[in-house]
Image (spheres, rainbow, N blue to C red):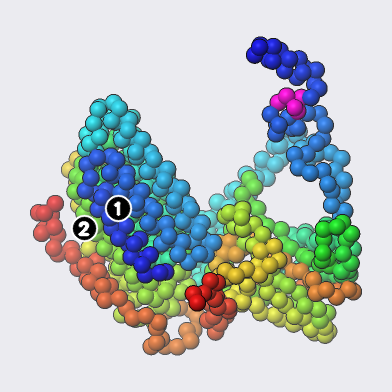
Amino acid sequence: MNPHAKLIFSLSLIMGTTLTISSNHWMMAWIGLEINTLSIIPLISKSHHPRAIEASIKYFLVQATASTLILFSGMINAWLTGQWDITQLTHPTPSLLLTTAIAMKLGLAPFHFWFPEVLQGSSLTTALLLSTMMKLPPITILFLTSHSLSPTLLITLSIISTALGGWMGLNQTQTRKILAFSSISHLGWMTMIIMYNPKLTLLTFYLYSILTTTVFLSLNTTKTLKLSTMMTSWTKAPALNTTLMMTLLSLAGLPPLTGFLPKWLIIQELAKQEMTPMAVTMAMLSLLSLFFYLRLTYYSTITLPPNSTNHMKQWHINKATNPSIAIFTSMSILLLPLSPMILTTI
Amino acid sequence: MALTVMLLNSACLRGRCCRHQVLHPLLGSLLSDSVSKLYSSYRRPGTQPEKKTSWQNTDFSLKKGFDVLKTQLSMLKKETEDYLTGPGGHPFSQYLLEQTRVLWEFRSQEDLNKWVISSDVEIGGKSEVYLTLGRNNQAALLYGTLNTEVPRDGETKYSGYCSMRAKPPVGSFGRKKYYDWSNFNCLYLRVRGDGRPWMVNIYTDPYFSHQKDDLYNYFMFTRGGPYWEEIKIPFSKFFLSSRGRVQDDQHPIWLDKASFLRALSICTLGFTIGDKVDGPFQLEINFIGLLNDRAHTEEFAYETYEKNPRA
């Protein structure tokens, strides 16, 4: 892509995100969301492949609808209460509309159908942006309005998301779709705790972003788009494969890795709020996702492929490993001992 | 005044005259008694004259409805069981270990029914094509005569093609089914031709109707000998064409949502002969399969060029 165009789209993405997360007027939040949508569209359709174009159109339609609903809920709230402040969403009708709109934006079940298709049609780097950066503004809006949203609806959305994210990820063979369902599952966890402790939602989101970034960057280095390629990726970068295994287990939420921290804190908070059945349900549903994470771990690192590879080690790969992978990998594996420090700040 | 117009309109409607002019121009022709079409009534020479509309041919009986519902529900049940088994209805171990897969084998009439033959008779030409089972029911025999005589309808310039195309797979309740061919990178055919060149077409049912004429083609040159030949065509060799014209903007086929005609979502496979040579042709196909050739690392055989180069 033309570097000037790439710069403009990247800066617009940053600007749109910053605009939304720093705004307290519904109109500014909507503008930021729209800028984000418009700037990611060319990045998704960069390769001009029909699948990429399909993904960008699907993304645009869903996001535009959701943005409209967000603006509409803000307008109804302004009509009923006389003010446009995001934190003062007091009427139940706009709250319901906003929850639906945010669910569409994030890809929470049952509004998740676009997410795997869009991720599958885009490149790994763009998929990383879609899973992390594009989720920050809607989660911020959810954080700001969490006190006035319907708890029943949020709990229902979160349980369905965790369940569907786990179930539908089981039969997938394409890595991007697997990560899409992993994202849906994690969003379920984030939504579950937002009414009781919104800061835990943000913590979960930040840690999930770090983990997902590591996984996407590792897969991008080895150009792993499907499971069969994953089985032979150890020939390209053996050390990276090992750290990918640890990162995937961290994403699954296994102690003593970083990914365990949000799940532990959420279950603890739910138990404190006397929502133990919910905590048990979430823990059981995350076993489904654990199954496919373990499968990925087995295929990438623990087992050798059944077919012979052309060479023992591909000493010549097209691009060097991104140095930021090392930083992100360290953070995604080793942050659990720092949890007392993290807990005091949230 | 408005009342007068309304009364006149209602009288016209009740009188069933000029109904199509009174009502909405589009709906009027649907509501009128005559079998008039919304499009031109010109009929191409190869097509049969339509005496009854398609909805008049449909059987609306309750019993048939129940039978269809039962069939569709059993298909849905099978699809759910396949989903629980693993990707594509096979266990995961099979997905990871398989390097070859046979897609079509021609051993019975039922296998032949999954294919459709067509020729330029549709546009008024004179080619003939037939599909039968070969000797000992071991192969499909596609044979006929190619005739490049152009139909005299004033608009057709070229003629002379015959083709065989697989029917797209349909799931329960008429949904499109997709296969995952991402594990393979070559098409493997065991054929015995007559020396004539054939074109293998892959149609991927695109998301947008703008791309409904998109086809991925490659050529298959057959030997005429008495021996069977096994032809391996990598998917990286297929080039994109639309309505028969090779496109400038080329891209490789994506195979992850394969339905044999679409690329990536491959929907159907087809064989076409159109080498501008009049005369008989014959192609025997033993089986069509897929192969994962690990030595083949090419992603796409054609390089793209800048369409509007600067200076």
Residue A343 rendering spot, x and y as whole percentages: 13, 54
Task: Give the structural element (helix, strand or loop) at label 2.
Answer: helix
Q: Residue at x 76, y 42 (%)?
A: B39
Q: Nearer the viewer, residue A170 or A62?
A: A62
Q: Earlier in the sequence, mark 2 or mark 1?
A: 1
- Indicate the quadrant containing the N terminus of chain B: top left, top right, bottom left or bottom right: top right
Marks 2, 1 in one chain: yes
Q: Residue at x 21, y 67 (%)?
A: A331
Compared to residue A6, the image places residue B52 above or below, namely: above
Count of numbered tags: 2
Q: What residue sits right under mark 1 in the picture?
A: A16
Residue A285 rendering spot, x and y as whole percentages: 35, 51
Q: What residue sits right under mark 2 in the picture?
A: A261
Q: For the residue marked with disc 2, what is the amino acid?
A: Leu
> Is residue A295 visible in this depiction of the protein?
no
Q: Residue at x 30, y 60 (%)?
A: A11
Q: Name the mark nearer the viewer: 2 or 1.
A: 1
The chain under label 2 reads A
Q: Nearer the viewer, residue A200 or B262?
A: B262
Q: For the residue marked with disc 1, what is the amino acid?
A: Gly
The chain under label 1 reads A
> Is residue B165 found left or right of A52 in the rendered image?
right
Magenta segment: B19-23
Q: Nearer the viewer, residue B265 or A244?
A: B265
> Is residue A211 found left or right of A39 in the rendered image?
left
> Is residue A55 visible in this depiction of the protein?
yes
